[in-house]
Amino acid sequence: MTETEKKKAATKFAADWKDRGNEKSDTQTFWMSLLRDVYGLDGIAENVEFEKRVKLEHTKFIDVYVKPTRVLVEQKDITKDLDAAIQQSDKTWLRPIEQLQRYAMALPLSEHPRWSVTCNFREFRIYDMEHPLNAPEVLKLEDLPEQYNRMNFLVDTGDENIKQEMAVSLKAGELVGALYDAILAKYQDPNNPETLRSLNKLCVRLVFCMYAEDAGLFAGHSKFHNYLKKVADKDINDVRKALLELFRILDTKPEDRDPYDDPELLEFPYVNGGLFKDEHIEIPRLDEHIIHLLLGECSEDFDWSKISPTIFGAVFESTLNPETRRSGGMHYTSIENIHKVIDPLFFDDLKAELAAILARPRSDSWRTRLLTEFQNKISKLVFFDPACGSGNFLTETYLSLRRLENEIIADQTKEAQGQTAMMGLGADFAGIKVSIGQFYGIEINDFAVTVARTALWIAESQMMKETEAIISIPLNFLPLKSYTNIVEGNALRIDWETVVPKKELSYIMGNPPFIGASMMTSTQKNEAGAIFGKGKRINSIDYVGAWYCKAAELMKGTLVQTAFVSTNSITQGEQVEPLWGKLIREYGVVINFAYRTFKWNSEAKEKAAVHCVIIGFASGVERKDKYIYGTAAVPSHASNISPYLVDAPNILVSSAGGGTLCNTPRMTKGNQPSDGGNLILSEEERNAMIAHDPSIECCIRRYVGSKDFINNDVKRYCLWLKDISPSVYRKNADIMKRLEAVKKMRLASSAKPTRALADKPYIFFSTPQTDSNYLCIPEVSSERRRYIPIGFMDKSIIASNKLLIIADATMYHFGVLTSNVHMAWMRTVCGRLKSDYQYSSANVYNTFPWPTPTEQQKLKIEQTAQAILDARALYPDSSLADLYDELTMPPELRKAHQANDRAVMDAYGFVKGSPARTSESACVAELMKMFQTLTSK
């Protein structure tokens, strides 16, 4: 279906179902019509299951299940409120989405939904099950004609064209990898850097030759294959020399060639561009296996013209040693993620501008002029990727611009109606204005530089083929007429203006290296330090921060805009203030758009497990309309995007290590053993020791860390000899052996404080725990939980350093800390371990602005906090992991938390109906203002 047909069908559907809908009689008709008529889903009987059975305590039925996309639907009557809980057969009360969450848990893993929908015929509530904590998207039936794309997930199984290109490109990467390994084994010194440099160049040249013959760039199909096969059939030892001769010819202009050369060689075209430049390249002797691989699997059995240069560039680069790739911080971006950068940065606006021009009637005298001006405009845009790797950002941007240009050429060709003279058509067609010369990059790896250049040339060839198809006239691609501007070098040591003057530059983009502050080498620290300056907190900034600073410096006083993919750590925890404080204060940086944390998608063979953000920022351009992208299909509009990527003022939270902002009880880490594991006991070890010597039972205490506290699945114990007389345990051989091992471990430590405690092996390295009961918070907790599980612990239990503890905390403190207000603050300012919450006293607890409740409000918080503990007690066999999973959270516990949330929000003055009560970002914005007021005092 075309977009026009979908919109027309959506308009009719919305009109047909306005103000009607009975859950029992209309559900199937409603959804069959929506899926078939609006979204074009064929085979409803095969693809959609109504009343799908799920086995819980009783058999239940899912109203609608869309099989290809695994979408669950819970349909309610038009009179029903989708936020209202309904009593179930087991007497629990569940909202429609909670019903679906329960059903989902009963399905096989292969049928688990990515999307769930609740509907009452008047509106659709759309839930992304990858992010169950997020508020649902709401789509009203009346808005369906204009916003039908928001529910494409009902039938969208992915772009098949991209999937096909990806499959072809991944196969190409496998072939290159096999060829690479086979040839490498033939070198005399395979570990020599010069050997690897030669092999890299050789692989690039071979790939270009195979692409050129499949794409028709060489005279005749299989030209390269036939030339080498003829040589190999005569004498396989001559293939090496034949390749060197071919490379020489490809780099020689026809007029400069020896006319007495092999006639077959002379038929090859001049390539130009430096790809086959006459420089030393070492080629070993090739055996039968390599020849078969090259001429059989790589040439005869594979069509190189079908590869995506964007995807293949990344895959090709992955033939490098994986360790080299990791140490260089290189990751490869999928086409989808590239567009998350370039679309909001510039491409969405360009598409909209061209669409508006093409929508003008052909009789409009301004139409042709506007098209010409638009083409000239995109041909003058200049793009720069200062960590370009294999060039996939530059390549995909070039392809995207050329597709826009081809739309213009197609429109002009149709307008000309065959008058070729008017179009300037011919082999040297002058209608193409967008050039790879508009694209600049810096890359430290010489092989990646060559791959990036080659990928751009392949992209240029493919787009010229598309233009050929439009104008129906063959065009000359070789010799290469344009040059790539990819510079080999260290982007942090190069003056970027020597690569591209900022007065000519339009956009900076890319994904600079992902290397955490603690993982940087001394060289990288020096490079970053030269840009950041010096200071204790500066040392916490990730390597990528240096690219932000260099980009901000270049943009100052210009209209240049930048967008980078980065690890999410630069928007969380202790990095935010030193990095963004510098960017905002020194360079006047503003954030114009941002993607909040998402999981990285890569086309590389070894996928990088990274959680990223995308930040679009500028120094001289502040957009009126700023947008924050998340899991929702539609981005949220923001009045200001803070460095925490929320709609809030640019208030930066500095970690407060010395004390709390609001004079609340002190939070510390739990007890740190620094013992080499010798003071920690399993349950079996503890039982065996006591069975052998009951007198030492007083020396052993229960020991709990984050995982133990949340999961309650493994019991651990520790030797706790603090304040116990040596006479109790000195004669116990097992204990003394363990203490000796602790002493030995500490003496061998590189840390002076650890060595200093070697003469006290009977105590933990740090013992902040007091003789009081305490409140504990896990240092790390899953992002999939709405609430971090926290709770009270008896003083007899020893908290590990993976728990954060507050001695003598009250029920009021527990109520505020477990509330959605504190959780909103935590989610914004805490650090992350991948995407999991990483709570700390300095960044989260000490900086948190507490409310100033009345006595009545405080009492209400204490009561609701106790109700949370009471609800947990109803499920003594369940762990906190069980109770706080969004899919299995008992209704009594959820209800208790919701009551506590309301009580805490009342104490903050977030009255019913205020944005801070219904929107987490608005709540955080208010907390930020409180933080600013409190710190200014």
Image (cartoon, helix red, strand yellow):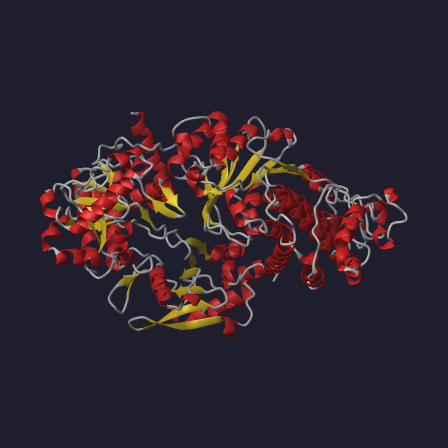
- Counting from the top left corner in percent of width and height, residue 833 is at 38, 46
Q: Along the horizontal axis of the image, is 586 left or right of 167?
A: left
In this view, the residue in front, 26 or 594, is 594
- Counting from the top left corner in percent of width and height, residue 118 is at 40, 61
Q: Is residue 407 visible?
A: no
Q: Along the horizontal axis of the image, is 437 left or right of 259?
A: left
Q: Is residue 448 visible?
A: yes
Q: Is residue 102 above or below residue 463?
A: below
Q: Residue at x 25, y 52 (%)?
A: 709
Q: How many marks?
A: 0
**Which residue lies most toward the right here?**
260
Please tell me in which quadrant of the rendered image residue 278 appears. top right
- Counting from the top left corner in percent of width and height, residue 500 is at 64, 32
In this view, the residue in front, 897 or 252, is 252
Q: Along the horizontal axis of the image, is 46 left or right of 504?
A: left
Image quadrant where one finds the N terminus: bottom right
Image quadrant where one finds the C terminus: top left
In this view, the residue in front, 741 or 777, is 741
Please tell me in which quadrant of the rendered image residue 721 appears. top left
- Counting from the top left corner in percent of width and height, residue 754 is at 28, 37
Please tell me in which quadrant of the rendered image residue 874 appears. bottom left
Q: Is residue 152 above or below residue 527?
A: below
Q: Is residue 174 above or below residue 516?
A: below
Q: Is residue 688 above or below residue 737?
A: below
